[in-house]
Image (tube, rainbow, N blue to C red):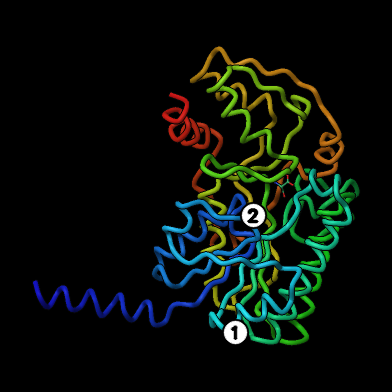
């Protein structure tokens, strides 16, 4: 038993010794909490530094290191990168599509100036830099059905424009300075334990809560608006897998990622299999215009071919896992 214990301890110590120090900005948003957990499990509790400008919950504090980091403050970020010996920077801070249109100047500052700060620091300190991009990086002149990796990108939201900017700057810094910049374009991400932060695809999370709470969902998109979507576990796994792909396998610095496409009506029908009393009223608002300019089918064959991306959750599985998670909460 002793030698097994020693071997296991040595293995864990070696893993921890080789583990990258990962700083996650905007970590209290939809993706940060889950990714932090995933990396702490993989590389040890000490390997992840969660950061944001918000006050964390007790739960977050109990899970490991959390610090205040304002991505608009270059010196503050620089100090963290140096003092915490950061190797990888995962940059989640951003205003999403719908909320960005309501506060364009803040979106420009956060999504563009904030990104410049992390880009510059990543170059200076030779960090691996991951920045999520989005289906929102496409626009009405892009092919929508399907949308390939390389095509016209003329988005009509400040969120989309800032993401195209990030994709291009990252690619340029890679080619010019050898920066290990990587990005994935995500569809709408659906999660149960964290809430999305003001996007056009948010209805696909909210409908589950409403179905269980009141049996009535008011949808801000038309019933036949088809958009690509992914379950959060698949999304986080794609980041984890992508960041360890050897450089020589990557043909692009930014890949499309996808799992499924559905309309609000498709989703409601699937949920009704479990909650037949669900009623949906359609009241499209300005988010409809955004959705109408985005991909309907997202072609992620590049990621599948170059580094083996595979989703696990389709619409059926998504509905099952969301209801399994949320049903006990609403009793
Ligand atoms: C949004 O709707 O803004 C985001 C996204 C698809 O990038 N969920």
Camera-side residue: 248 or 102? 102
State whether residue 28 is above or below residue 21. Answer: above
Total count of labels: 2
Q: Which label's residue is closer to the chain start, 2 or 1?
A: 1
Give residue 96's position: percent from left, percent from top.
75, 50
For the N terminus, the quadrant is: bottom left
Which residue in the protein does label 1 denote?
82
Give the quadrant of residue 279: top right
Which residue in the protein does label 2 denote?
257
Q: Residue furthest top?
A: 277
Give residue 113's position: percent from left, percent from top.
81, 68
For the C terminus, the quadrant is: top left
Camera-side residue: 78 or 314? 78
Give residue 71's position: percent from left, percent from top.
71, 68
Query: Looking at the image, which residue is at 83% across and 58% down?
Result: 151
Q: Is residue 288 left or right of residue 32?
A: right
Mark 1 burial class by Cα count in 10 Å: few <14, some 14-19, many 20+: few
Instruction: Classify mark 1: helix, strand or loop.
Output: helix
Nearer the viewer's eye, disc 2 or disc 1?
1
Query: Looking at the image, which residue is at 63% across and 32% down?
Result: 206
């Amino acid at each position: 038993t002793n030698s097994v214990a020693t071997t296991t301890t040595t293995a864990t110590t070696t893993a921890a010794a080789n583990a990258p120090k990962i700083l996650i900005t905007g970590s209290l948003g939809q993706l940060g909490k889950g990714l932090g957990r995933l990396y702490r499990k993989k590389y040890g509790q000490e390997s992840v530094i969660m950061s944001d400008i918000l006050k964390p919950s007790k739960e977050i504090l109990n899970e490991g290191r959390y610090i205040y980091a304002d991505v608009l403050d270059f010196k503050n970020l620089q100090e963290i990168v140096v003092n915490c010996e950061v190797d990888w920077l995962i940059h989640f801070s951003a205003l999403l599509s719908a909320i960005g249109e309501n506060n364009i100047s803040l979106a420009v500052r956060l999504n563009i100036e904030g990104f410049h700060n992390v880009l510059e620091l990543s170059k200076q300190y030779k960090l691996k830099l991951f920045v999520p991009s989005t289906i929102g990086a496409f626009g009405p002149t892009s092919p929508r059905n399907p949308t390939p990796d390389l095509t016209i990108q003329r988005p009509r939201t400040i969120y989309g424009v800032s993401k195209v900017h990030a994709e291009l700057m990252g690619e340029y810094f890679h080619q010019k300075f050898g920066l290990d910049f990587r990005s994935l374009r995500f569809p709408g991400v659906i999660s149960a334990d964290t809430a999305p932060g003001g996007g056009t695809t948010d209805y696909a999370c909210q409908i589950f809560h409403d179905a269980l709470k009141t049996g009535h969902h008011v949808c801000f998109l038309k019933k036949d608006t088809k958009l690509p979507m992914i379950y959060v576990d698949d999304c986080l796994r794609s980041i984890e897998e992508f960041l360890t792909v050897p450089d020589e396998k990557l043909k692009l610095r930014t890949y499309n990622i996808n799992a499924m496409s559905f309309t609000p009506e498709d989703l409601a029908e699937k949920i009704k299999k479990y909650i037949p009393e669900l009623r949906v009223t359609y009241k499209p608002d300005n988010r409809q215009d955004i959705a109408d300019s985005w991909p309907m089918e997202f072609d992620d064959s590049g990621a599948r071919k170059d580094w083996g991306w595979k989703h696990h959750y389709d619409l059926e599985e998504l509905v099952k896992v969301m209801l399994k998670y949320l049903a006990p909460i609403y009793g």
